Image: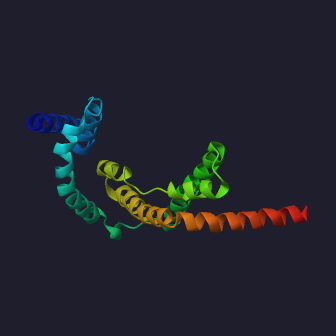
Amino acid sequence: MSIGLIGLILFFAGISMMFGLSEILGAFIAGIMLADIHDVRPLKCLTVPVRDLFLPIFFISFGISINLEKGVIYALFFVLIVWGVLSKWIVGRVEGRIYGLTRVQANEAGFSLAPRGKFSILFTALLNGAISLFVGLYIFVSAIVGIILFRFSEYLAEKTEKILTKVLADEKKEE
């Protein structure tokens, strides 16, 4: 079974490379196909130890590929980070309220949804040049911001609700 799994992964990685795409994308497609198996536990027993062994090497390789000397458009970068975090917070807050969460719980859900870049990092292998630098930095910064927001989401949710309550109360007084 393990030789067949390795063969399938290498086959799809090779097909992907033949079309000028990243071998990572081919392996990802093989994984999606294998997800339809009724009992994936044996496959996970084979793949998780290998993933845990090579994941640090992958991140070192990813970090090395980010060349800060190529330059970044910082204004656009800042706008994208703020938009990514703000849009996730709004979606979490609105959907949380629709689902029936309290305002504080909905705020916490919004802060918990901040992008953390886990999946996006796979697609940077498809990019090159300045866009690769931009996307790599975006993933890195949004992952750090997302982790911090997730860690302090309860505190931020309570503070945000107090501020929103005060602002909305002040607006009602002015009317």
Instruction: Write the residue at 62% across / 43% down.
Output: 99
Instruction: Write the residue at 55% across / 54% down.
Output: 109
Quadrant in which the C terminus is drawn: bottom right
Res 147 quadrant in image: bottom left
Res 95 quadrant in image: top right
Q: Which residue, as the protein is rendered here, is positioned at the far left?
A: 3
Instruction: Write the residue at 58% across / 58% down.
Output: 86
Q: Is residue 154 left or right of residue 6?
A: right
Relative height, residue 112 to residue 27 (above, below): below
Q: Is residue 32 left or right of residue 51?
A: right
Relative height, residue 3 to residue 138 (above, below): above
Q: How many marks?
A: 0
In the foreground, 26 or 7: 7
Quadrant in which the N terminus is drawn: top left
Q: Position of residue 49 (x, y in %)?
A: 17, 51
Relative height, residue 144 to residue 84 (above, below): below
Q: Position of residue 30 (x, y in %)?
A: 24, 35
Q: Which residue, as the protein is rendered here, is positioned at the far bottom?
A: 69
Res 37 quadrant in image: top left
Q: Is residue 20 visible?
A: no
Q: Position of residue 156 (x, y in %)?
A: 58, 66
Instruction: Write the residue at 65% across / 48% down.
Output: 97
Q: Is residue 20 left or right of residue 154?
A: left
Q: Position of residue 163 (x, y in %)?
A: 70, 68
In the foreground, 159 or 21: 159
Q: Is residue 109 left or right of residue 48?
A: right
Way the structure is coloured: rainbow
